Amino acid sequence: MRHECLVYENSGGAVTTWHFSQGSVTRPVTVSGRIISNDSSVLHSAALAGDGILLGYEQALLPDIKSKRLVRLMPRWTVPDRPMHLLYNAGPVMTPKLRVFVTELQQAFQA
């Protein structure tokens, strides 16, 4: 709560409560920070620059964690999954290119 956090903002406003779980225990933490953005790449860049703590999608941050550009805090705690949606025009026939893209995304983001 006393750290400079990099806050994501969605259509409902800034997400200033982060939820952490360990087993059956869940703790909401109210966060704040000078950098608020609706663009996760902006927040990612700010974290790499040392501007604050980022709550982000682990798979997207893994290369930076492995290379030690970012350090995972609180490894015993988890955060809730967030839904991800892939939207495309549902025309009469899915093109082979789109089918491959959808399949690759599904495989990349499987739990």
Image (spheres, rainbow, N blue to C red):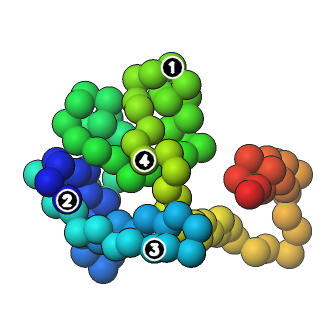
Q: Can residue 52 be seen here?
A: yes
Residue named by callout 2:
1
Q: Is residue 34 left or right of residue 93?
A: left
Looking at this rendering, what residue extends furthest in the bottom direction?
Answer: 12
Secondary structure found at label 4: loop
Labels 3 and 4: the sequence-earlier one: 3
Type of the residue with mark 4 = Met
Q: Is residue 70 left or right of residue 96?
A: left
Residue named by callout 4:
74
Residue named by callout 1:
67
Q: Position of residue 35 (x, y in %)?
A: 17, 50
Q: At 79% from the left edge and 74% from the top edge, which residue is drawn?
A: 91
Type of the residue with mark 2 = Met
Labels 2 and 1: the sequence-earlier one: 2
Residue named by callout 3:
26
Q: Give neighbour class at mark 4: few <14, some 14-19, many 20+ (Cα, 10 Å).
A: few
**CA distance for labels 3 and 4:** 14 Å
Q: Nearer the viewer, residue 66 or 60?
A: 66
Q: Is residue 93 left or right of residue 10?
A: right
Labels 1 and 4: the sequence-earlier one: 1
Type of the residue with mark 1 = Ser
Q: Position of residue 9 (x, y in %)?
A: 29, 65
**CA distance for labels 4 and 2:** 13 Å
Q: Give neighbour class at mark 1: few <14, some 14-19, many 20+ (Cα, 10 Å).
A: few
**CA distance for labels 1 and 4:** 18 Å
Q: Choose mark 1 or mark 4, whichever is in front.
A: 4
Q: Quadrant of residue 82?
A: bottom right
Q: At 16% from the left edge and 48% from the top edge, which residue is drawn?
A: 4
Dividing the image into 4 quarters, which one contains the N terminus?
A: bottom left
**CA distance for labels 2 and 3:** 16 Å
